[in-house]
Image (cartoon, coloured by chain):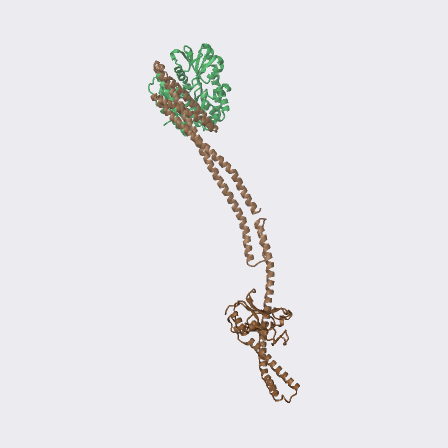
Amino acid sequence: MRIATRLKLSSALSLGALIVMIPVLVWSFIASGTAKRNSLLANDIQKNVFERTSLRDEYFLYNEARARIQWHIKKDLIAQLLQKASTLFKIEANRIILQEMKQNFEDTVVIFSRIEQFRGDPAARTANKEIYQALENRLFSQLLLKAYALHEATSRLQESARARADATYNRAIILTFIFIVVMALATLLNSLFINGVLKKRLAALEKGARIISGGNLEYRIEYEGSDELADLTRTINSMTENLAKLYASLEEEIAQRKKSAEDIEKLNEHLEQHTGQLEAANKELEAFSYSVSHDLRAPLRHITGFVEMLHKRNTTTLDEKSCHYMEVISESAKKMGNLIDDLLSFSRMGRIEMMKTRTSMVQLVNDVRKELQIDDKEMEIEFDLKPLPVVYGDPAMLRLVLINLIANAMKFSHGRTPIRIEVNYRNDTPRETVFFVRDNGAGFDMKYADKLFGLFQRLHSPADYDGTGIGLANVRRIIHRHGGRTWAEGAVDKGATFYFSLPDREEG
Amino acid sequence: MWKAGVVVMFAAALFGCQKSNQHQNQSFQKITVAFTLQPESSLVHIAHNKGFFKEEGLEIEPQLHTYGKSALKSVLDGKADLATVAETPVMFAVLNGEKICIVANIFTSNENTAIIARKDRGIASPKEIRGKRIAFTPGTSVEFFMDSFFMANDIERKDVHIVGLKPEEMFDALVSGKVDAACTWNFPLAQLKKELGDRGITFLDKHIYTEMFNIAAQQDFVVKNPEATKKFLRALIRADQFAEEHPKEAQEIIALALQVDYNLVREVWREFNFRVSLDQSLLVVLEDETRWAILNHLTTASEMPNYLSYINVDALKAVKPAAVRIIR
């Protein structure tokens, strides 16, 4: 049987017992109340009978009308009480006593009336005083007899009513006691029974839970019956089974992850190795590049110097074509010198130590603006500088970035009237601030956007715009060293916008 | 007269048979009980008939009498141990100096004694008894009732011709016309009423007399045989209970024992009050009758005895304490 059903059954039985017992108790207490009321009535009758007896004696002793009147008042009262008693007393034995009381009471009334009658006849009293007195004595004796009988019957009724009241009260108390005992026993037995069942089931559950929690997921808890605890046991067994499966799959996954972690670790080791090798190679390359550039400068000066000396000595002896060749050699050597200078400067950008500090971008822009004479009226430039934030970086390097970008904007906007240059920023991307320089110049084809920041990369003819193509490469290198990014947007003849970002970084 | 004789003989034969059976068990205490063939002795008849005495360990030797005065005389003569008797013979015996006592009252009634008169003798009202012949049993409760009745109706003894008869003589005397009226009890009172029918008239005054029938014994017997007395009373109490629970069977027992018609017993049964007790009323009645006896010179005694000395409550108090209601 299910525990809920068992509890419901128990509750129903208790309720049933309650339904049975409550009317019994109510009836019992009502009966007790009735018996007590009857007992009080019997006491009242006894009291009045006694008082009437006293008044009778008073009347016979002193013959006072007052005592006689009082006796009659008591008589009427007793008659009413007896009448009332005859409607209230239902037990046959009591009704018999009441009948006896009534008979004796009526006899006393008749005898008393006869004595009253004699006493009220003065002629008769004086005519035969001796006989009158004897008769009155005789009647008085009978009155005494009846009064004794009335007293005795009243006492019996009183005793019977009291016994009845006691019995009904005791019965009510006993019934209450029985009710309490029965309910308590029922509750106790029910509790013991349910406790027994629960104890057994819970012990099995506790043992099973302990074994399972100890790691034995193969253990299955034994159960019996079909109650809620059996359901719970089945559920726990099912859960344990699922746990065992899950545990197996987890173990497998953990093993895989462990293996993956080991692989990643190995890969990282390789990567670090490669990075180290790359960094070393890069440094070697940098050093080589610098060394080559530096070493190239001496022979280049020799070439330039010797060409100039040759030109001064042989301007008359050399034909025109040779002179032209010499000029070409001289020009090329100069260009090569410029290229080598640019290469050295680029190389320096990668090697120079950075001195990061709080740097006002507005201040930097204004310095550049002054240096490039942007505000010169002849330039016809509308320079739009927005309020810029303070950043954390190397001010000299960032200044170089701004010079390159603003100078590029001026260079590639040549011919526009007016030239419009905007320097602004945005911080719509997390953990960085993006600055940009926008112009309304020649712009570029976006398909070449990736090449813009390459070393010595040029999208325009040197005839249109001079320069070696080192500026944007330097910009990218400086920004990369700051941990930022560079990119550009533009369209041919529609102007260009060059962006660079700097990470939002706390001062270290 | 002859009827009463037949009744006595029949009853004697009946109890004689029972007596022979009782002799078979010698362990029973044997006592002689003089009791009357009157309804007043019903409890003794019932107890005897139902074997209550035997069950209580008593072997009863019945001694049947037609009235209580005779039964008491048997006790006084030492022929019986216990007697059933009304209060009047007891009162006279005490005034005569007899050492007797009452151990229990077993019957009371206000309607068991009356004057029955013949109308054809010109008696239609109590006062018309004057000058007529009225029979009574001297020295019994009947005499006390008769005098009380006369007093209540302003009649003096000298105004009537009183004729002393035994109870068993009443029926024939009134029916035959030897007397004009009879003052008597049951039975023959009810028998006479039935016999005379419309020719008869009954004068009853239930407020002037209460008959009290008792168990009396020599004081010496009660003192020496307390257990026997208790057993006897215990058997009577059982008979009382039986009569209350089985009135019809009780009436049948009495009709058989007294040899009267069952219907006659049934008709008068409601007038009887059977109860084994000792009430204060008994003292009142005994003293009232004593005053009457002294006043009317029916005794040589002139002082009121202390009747408490003539009532032994010990036995009844031992077997049924609640039944003793004498103020002490």
Q: Nearer the viewer, residue B269 or A211?
A: A211
Q: Is residue A454 visible?
A: yes
> How many numbered callouts?
0
Among the 4 quarters of the image, the one containing residue B40: top left
The residue under the point 52% across, 45% down is A190
Q: Is residue A284 visible?
A: no
Left or right, residue B125 beside residue A400: left
User: Does A327 appear above or below A240?
Assistant: below
Direction front: furthest residue: A378
Left or right, residue A64 beside residue A29: left
Among the 4 quarters of the image, the one containing residue B236: top left
Q: Nearer the viewer, residue B75 or B135?
A: B135
User: Does A95 appear above or below A441?
Assistant: above
User: Does B246 appear above or below A447?
Assistant: above
User: Does B235 appear above or below A373?
Assistant: above
Q: Nearer the viewer, residue A451 or B118?
A: A451
Q: Nearer the viewer, residue A214 or A114?
A: A114
Q: Pinpoint residue A58: horizontal percent, then vertical percent.
A: 35, 23
Q: Pinpoint residue A476: horizontal percent, then vertical percent.
A: 58, 72
- Looking at the rendering, in which quadrant would you find the C terminus of chain B? top left
Q: Pinpoint residue B142: horizontal percent, then vertical percent.
A: 41, 17
Query: Chain coloured green: which letter?
Result: B
Among the 4 quarters of the image, the one containing residue B96: top left
Q: Pinpoint residue B255: horizontal percent, then vertical percent.
A: 49, 20
Chain A display color: brown
